Amino acid sequence: MAKVKKAWFCQNCGAQHSQWMGQCSRCHEWNTLVEEVLNKPDKRSVTRSAQPERKSPTPIRSIEYDTTKRTSTCDAELDRVLGGGIVPGSLILLGGEPGIGKSTLMLQVALRLKTSVLYVSGEESDHQVRMRAERIGIENEDCLVLTETRTQNIFQHAETLNPGLVVVDSIQTLSTEHLEASPGSVSQIRECAAEFLQFAKTTGIPVILIGHITKEGSLAGPKVLEHMVDVVLQFEGDRHHIYRLLRGQKNRFGSTSELGIYEMRGEGLREVPNPSEVLLSGNAEQLSGTAIAVMVEGVRPMLVEIQALVSTAVYGTPQRSSTGFDVRRLNMLLAVLEKRCGFRLGAKDVFLNVTGGIKVDDPAIDLAVVAAILSSDQDMPIGQGVCFAGEVGLAGEIRPANRIDHRVNEAAKLGFDQAFVSKAVKLEKTPHGIDVMKVAKVEDLVRGLFG
């Protein structure tokens, strides 16, 4: 009988150690090492689906290639992020915080597809899945629910049914009989993902895996999991807000800069085709500290509302707080206003918020952030119908934003009549009804807004 080989794996980063240690030498986390068995299964015990036929090398020009062979998910936002639909034989990983709506989104897709779907649930019973399906609405009668956690049993049902899509909720609950480790361990996640990858590539059936994330916001399990799959999607948002964002962190078949927006309702997730109208408050009363930024996610321009509050520091040390915006970039913009423009903000508290519970990283919203801070500091509201699109440099100069024509057109379409942009931009055609104000420095912005 072969000797049983064991090793210690870090549950946080997946690093392998020969003996137990209190602290992982790679990620420096404490008490994360778990003992697992390393014995591999006998090759004869591998299922038929995991044994691909031997193939000979093929000339690259003789390989059939069809760019239009994608399956639509009947969800415009998900299709946008995926690059047009699901590619046959692809392995997709969807991650997100608990309770954010991952299972609801995938069950919603399974209930709307025009093809047969095998929905594998390892966390909920079939009765719980049916209750959620009744709330969402059943449109696909070929949606088959399987409550199973053994990968070998899942592959047997998938080979018999030959569905158009397999959805697994979630990868952390699965286990393979080839390993003795507990479900959710690093080795089990890695081995199960490898089996599903081989299943998807050999059968041509796309597979969507739902994954949990750690408290740091990264996908739970070994880092190699993200390298194995074809697409990594991140479902994020604030559970106290109704809007959810779907981002592509990795996509072998399309762009990773696209963004999908959903609205959480009682009957499921609703697609938001025009996010600018829902992200703006529409408050008719003019308030100081509010500015409208024109941002771009992928090829989609959106208008978001930036709120700032500047007040005298009561406790001596000024506070710098930001929600939805990088606090380090906020500190940089405050330093520019202090050094280049002469505004004394070093002894004041500054709070910044991006409404709607979304997170933005477009540098072109710098101009709106500066305008909101100055408006709150001077307690002078910015006029209605004014928006901003520009990046602020360390010298106080206004740098041009990319896709400026799309930004201005989106602002004009929503009824804005004035847009502040960099002086260096060159517009191909100015839309009717909007006045484009070009500024070179922050001082020009101050004169243009407050006189």
Image (cartoon, rainbow, N blue to C red):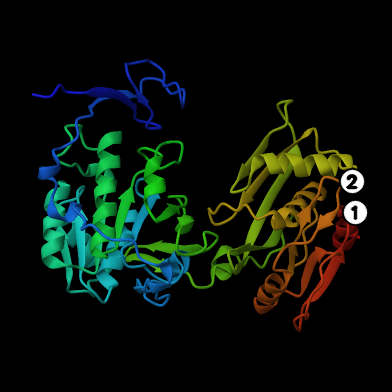
| 65, 214: nearer the viewer | 65
For the C terminus, the quadrant is bottom right
Residue 247 percent location from the top left of the image: 48, 57
Q: Residue tagged by mark 2?
A: 341
Picture quadrant where residue 24 is located: top left
* Direction from residue 25 to residue 47 in the image, left or right: left
| 43, 129: nearer the viewer | 43
* Direction from residue 126 to residue 61 in the image, left or right: right
| 415, 106: nearer the viewer | 106
Q: Which mark is residue 443?
A: 1
* Direction from residue 172 to residue 153 in the image, left or right: left
Q: Residue at x 12, y 59 (%)?
A: 157
Picture quadrant where residue 107 is located: bottom left
Amino acid type assigned to the residue bearing label 2 in the image: Cys
Q: Residue at x 38, y 15 (%)?
A: 22
Do the residues under discs 2 and 1 have CB atoms within 8 angstroms? yes
| 245, 166: nearer the viewer | 166
Q: Gap in Å between the C-alphas at discs 2 and 1? A: 7 Å
The image shows residue 282, relative to residue 66, as above or below, that is above
Amino acid type assigned to the residue bearing label 1 in the image: Glu
Q: Residue at x 54, y 57 (%)?
A: 356
Q: Residue at x 43, y 75 (%)?
A: 67
N-terminal label among 2 and 1:
2
Residue 297 percent location from the top left of the image: 59, 62
